[in-house]
Amino acid sequence: MTDTEPTIRPLGPPSPVPPDAVPLYGPRYDKENPARLYGELRNRQGAVLPVLLEDDVPAWLIIGYREVHQVLNDATLFARDSRRWNQWPNVPPDWPLMALVGYQPGSILFSEGAAHQRRAQAMTDAMAEVDRFELRTRCERIADELIDGFCGSDGAELMVQYANRIPALALAGMFGLAESEAWSIAEDVMAVLDGGEGALEAYQRFAGAMARLLAAKRAEPGPDVASRMLNHPAKLTDEELTQDLLIMMIAGQDPTANWIGNTLRLMLIDDRFSLTLAGGRRSVGQAMNEVLWEESPAQNTFRWATRDTRLGGRQIRAGDAVVICLAGANSDPLVLQSQDAGSRGNHAHFSFGHGDHGCPFPAPELGEIIAETSVEVLLDRLPDVRLAVPPNELVWRPAFRVRGLTALPVKFSPAPAVTKV
Ligand code: HEM
């Protein structure tokens, strides 16, 4: 913990478990599109309902559009520092959702108020200056190189060989990392994300690479995110810079990769998109927006009540965890003006979050450039790309955190490479 961080403790003893609490884990929740389940729950129990997370740890699930908006708009009442959670005595150390709730000292994700604002501003300003044209060109080259790695055969697994790789490589370049280092750093970021055995060592390697990057950029600043954050008036410390660059990598990697994967899946299974592929530049954008409404890569996020309050007719106690269900809000009939998703051209979904801790404003646009370029280049290079398995055999990752595929196997006619590999 830094000297400036306040000490926050659990707000009272664990709240009792309401009798109508619904388990939010298990095969039904993990395998189906949970939006259907949210619809049933909303009809039966309303926009705010008690749920049991893994190991039957209780929390509140917010699935109403208005209620999600209300919670995300009030960062004082529904705050980010998880240390105030009144259920900590019931949470085992190896809890499956620990990566989402475990307080990380010095992380922007758990900081609040002015301390958060200072760091968020530095990120925002540094990303605002990213040259969009250059980012698109770099993504095209990365996409071409990755496709060259498999286009000579007649099939590929697009999550591992393509979608999961592009965002990390693009972000590494955006930060000012040398191309030669980008992939090993991207792999370390993915190992930290996985949280497995090698996560700690991967973090240490990442921190070492960031220390070298910051030293190089301090000596010779460049037109990159690291140099701009280093020289920002917020005067971030090296520790803050390292943490914030890691968070940007992690927060950018997984949702953008799944945005690519979910969009490709939609375009490969849905005739509305495959029929228009020939002249279909616009339809990539439509598919991407539809994915944000219906298969949002970021599904849920947490906040903790700082005092007793009422929400959606429920009594929430100080220290209760509130699971903000972005996907649930997106599927609230209140906001769906039409059942035909194709006609839903607007961007009023919550897939980028909202409020103080929402995706910092330039990031959604940068993620969109990365995702859109990736989808377009793949469809241009492999025009007859198709699923290698029936759509219902595609396997989704456990649903709580992300909506994303474990694998996207495809077939296509072999095509020539276009870059020197
Ligand atoms: C260039 C790519 C991206 C970068 C660098 C990035 C970065 C970030 C960062 C740093 C945060 C934390 C903000 C804070 O706590 O103050 C954040 C939050 C968030 N991002 Fe992004 N992001 C990217 C792309 C995306 C995409 C593509 C999606 C979804 C499709 C997404 C969804 C979200 C959501 C939902 C949150 C809010 C989480 C919460 O409220 O707790 N991001 N992003």
Image (spheres, rainbow, N blue to C red):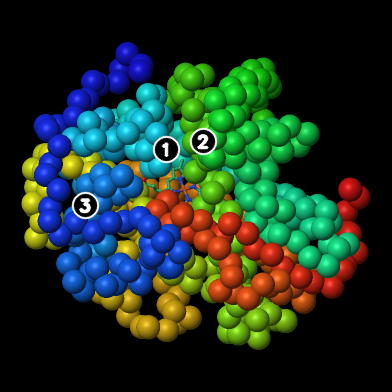
Q: Which residue is mark 3?
A: 60
* Residue labelled with disc 2: 195
Of the numbered discs 2 and 1, the one sitting upstream in the chain is 1
Q: In the displayed structure, would residue 408 be above or below residue 230?
A: below
Pick out the residue farthest to the top: 3
Counting other residues with Cα less than 10 Å from the Cα at mark 3, is it few (<14), some (14-19), or many (20 or more)? many
From the viewer's perspective, is residue 300 above or below residue 94?
A: below
Which amino acid lies under the numbered mark 1 shown in the image of this protein? Ala
- Under tag 2, what secondary structure? loop
Q: CA distance from mark 1 to mark 3?
A: 19 Å
| Mark 2 to mark 1 CA distance (whole Å) | 8 Å
Label 1: few (<14), some or many (≥20) within 10 Å?
few
| Foreground residue among 300 and 235 | 300
Q: What residue lies at 76% left-to-right and 37% top-to-bottom?
A: 179
- The answer to whether mark 1 is within 8 Å of ligand 1 is no
- Residue 284 figure quarter: bottom right
Q: What residue does disc 1 label?
A: 99
The amino acid type, in three-letter code, at marker 3 is: Trp
Answer whether residue 130 is visible to the viewer in this image: yes
Residue 400 placement, left or right of 57: right
The disc placed on residue 48 is: none
Position in image of residue 356 (x %, y %): 32, 43
Q: Secondary structure at mark 1?
A: helix
Q: Quadrant of residue 143?
A: bottom right
Is mark 2 in CB contact (under 8 Å) with mark 1? yes
Instruction: Decide if residue 69 is in sight here.
Output: no
Label 2 close to label 3 by CB (< 8 Å): no
Q: Which comes sooner in the sequence, label 1 or label 3? A: 3
